[in-house]
Amino acid sequence: MFLGIRIKELREEKELLQRQLAASLEIDTPMYSKIERGERKAKREQVIKLAELFEVNSEELLALWLAGQVFELVKEEETATKALKIIEQILTAKQ
């Protein structure tokens, strides 16, 4: 979802075709299209490869990728915001 929007923007900025990126990721074009539309999750390795292809910091795309996974996990939970704040506190304390 979050990742898909960003990689579509980057693809259009670079004037690349979905089939070009799909070939670079060694997947078929329909699968790449589903990743871009948020209908299929990309693998971590694919996200890193996309960052290389788009010449962007991999942390940007990995953060969007992870945010999408977390969102899917908690989106229907009533206490999602509270749980995320607890996680934020724990992660901040670790740094």
Image (tube, rainbow, N blue to C red):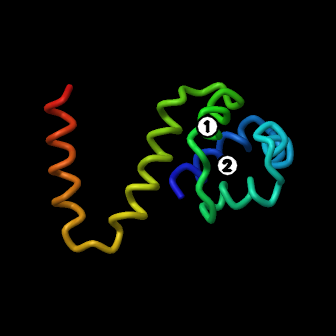
Q: Indicate the position of residue 70 as horizontal and vertical percent values.
A: 38, 56
Q: Which quadrant would the C terminus be assigned to in this image?
A: top left
Report the residue at 65% width, 61% height from top: 37
**Few, some or many residues within 10 Å of mark 1 (<14, 14–19, 20+):** few
- Name which residue type carries label 1: Glu
- Answer with left or right where residue 73 lies relative to residue 27: left
| N-terminal label among 1 and 2 | 2
Question: Label 1's element?
Answer: helix
Q: Indicate the position of residue 41 as horizontal and vertical percent values.
A: 59, 56
Question: Label 2's element?
Answer: helix
Q: Which residue is mark 1?
A: 45
Q: Which mark is residue 58?
A: none
Report the residue at 79% width, 48% height from top: 27
Residue 9 is drawn in which quadrant? top right
Q: Which residue is mark 2?
A: 8
- Name which residue type carries label 2: Lys
Q: Which quadrant would the N terminus be assigned to in this image?
A: bottom right
Q: Indicate the position of residue 48 as horizontal and vertical percent values.
A: 60, 33
Residue 53 is drawn in which quadrant? top right
Report the residue at 49% width, 34% height from top: 60
